[in-house]
Image (tube, helix red, strand yellow):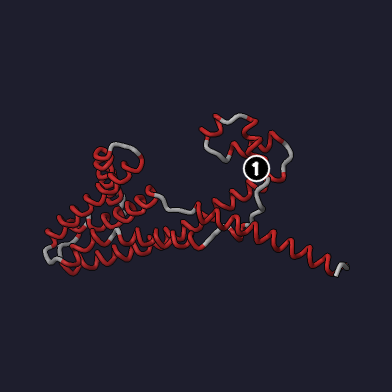
């Protein structure tokens, strides 16, 4: 059992164990780091609201018939359905590109033996504030720790949680359309549906701004009204530009 064949088997077994350990390390870390935070969620809701408001904002000047309004609302729902799908796919692509860049920087760091080059790579890839306050000795210590990290392959840079978040983005964009569009689909009175739809949109914009302020430590009421104003401005601008 101590011959060359046994030695070769041991070598490949150790290599396989090492590869599994490396993969598990990065898979677990990426799963922990992958998250759709509050600003991202609210941004997706805002995108969905602005998209449907560009449709509802043109109803009073473009058409008054119930059938035409229903067709316009179904077009708005279809537009947000497509936009949500595109947004989810773009999240996956942006995540892949961002992580591929990070992997490239880590590989570059591992290959260089120059302290100055290593410092430059690290400082270029961390927060400017953190880079400013860290000394060269601290950067060198970070460099040594990063060089000890397991190797990572681009094939392992995406996980199931990334696709779940892409699905969440799709739902956020699409579902944010429904409260604003439903009055037109349920009510026969177009004028009443318009007022109710606008009220719902303003409330959603206000709540989004209020939640964002609580998250970031800004003044809730001021931020909420600012969010409403920005949302209305963007809708008016989009309609004016032919959106």
At x 66% / y 52%, what residue is drawn? Answer: 150
Please, is residue 78 above or below residue 40 in the view?
below
Quadrant of the image containing the N terminus: bottom right
Asked if residue 162 lies left or right of residue 200, the reply is right
| Residue 179 place in picture, x, y as percent | 24, 60
- Left or right of residue 74, residue 34 in this image: right
Q: Position of residue 210 (x, y in %)?
A: 27, 44
Q: Residue at x 67, y 43 (%)?
A: 109
Residue 34: % across, % down: 48, 54
For the point 46% across and 56% down, which residue is it? Answer: 91
Relative placement, left or right, of 147 versus 230 is right
Judging depth in this view, the residue of 179 and 238 nearest the camera is: 179
Q: Position of residue 138 (x, y in %)?
A: 62, 33
Of residues 176 and 146, the one drawn nearer to the viewer in this rendering? 146
Kindly identify which residue carries mark 1: 145
Disc 1 crowd rating (10 Å Cα; few below 14, some 14-19, many 20+) is few
Label 1 sits on a secondary structure element that is: helix
From what the image shows, is residue 2 above or below residue 151? below
**How many numbered marks are there?**
1
| Residue at (20% x, 67% y) in the render | 185
């Amino acid at each position: 059992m101590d011959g060359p064949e046994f030695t070769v088997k041991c070598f490949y077994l150790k290599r396989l164990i090492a590869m599994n350990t490396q993969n598990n390390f990065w898979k677990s870390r990426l799963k922990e780091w992958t998250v759709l935070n509050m600003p991202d969620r609210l941004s997706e809701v805002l995108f969905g609201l602005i998209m449907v408001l560009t449709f509802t904002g043109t109803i009073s000047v473009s058409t008054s018939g119930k059938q035409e309004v229903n067709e316009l609302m179904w077009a708005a729902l279809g537009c947000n359905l497509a936009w949500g799908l595109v947004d989810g796919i773009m999240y996956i692509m942006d995540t892949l590109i961002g992580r591929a860049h990070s992997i490239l920087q880590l590989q570059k760091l591992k290959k260089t033996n120059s302290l100055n080059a290593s410092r430059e790579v690290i400082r270029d890839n961390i927060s400017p504030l953190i880079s400013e306050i860290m000394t060269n000795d601290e950067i060198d210590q970070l460099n040594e720790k990063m060089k000890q990290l397991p190797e990572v392959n681009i094939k392992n840079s995406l996980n199931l949680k990334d696709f779940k978040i892409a699905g969440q983005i799709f739902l956020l964009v699409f579902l944010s359309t429904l409260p604003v569009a439903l009055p037109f689909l349920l009510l026969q009175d177009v004028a009443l549906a318009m007022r109710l739809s606008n009220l719902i949109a303003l409330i959603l914009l206000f709540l989004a701004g209020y939640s964002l302020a609580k998250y970031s430590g800004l003044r809730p009421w001021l931020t909420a009204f600012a969010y409403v104003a920005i949302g209305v401005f963007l809708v008016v601008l989009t309609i004016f530009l032919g959106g």
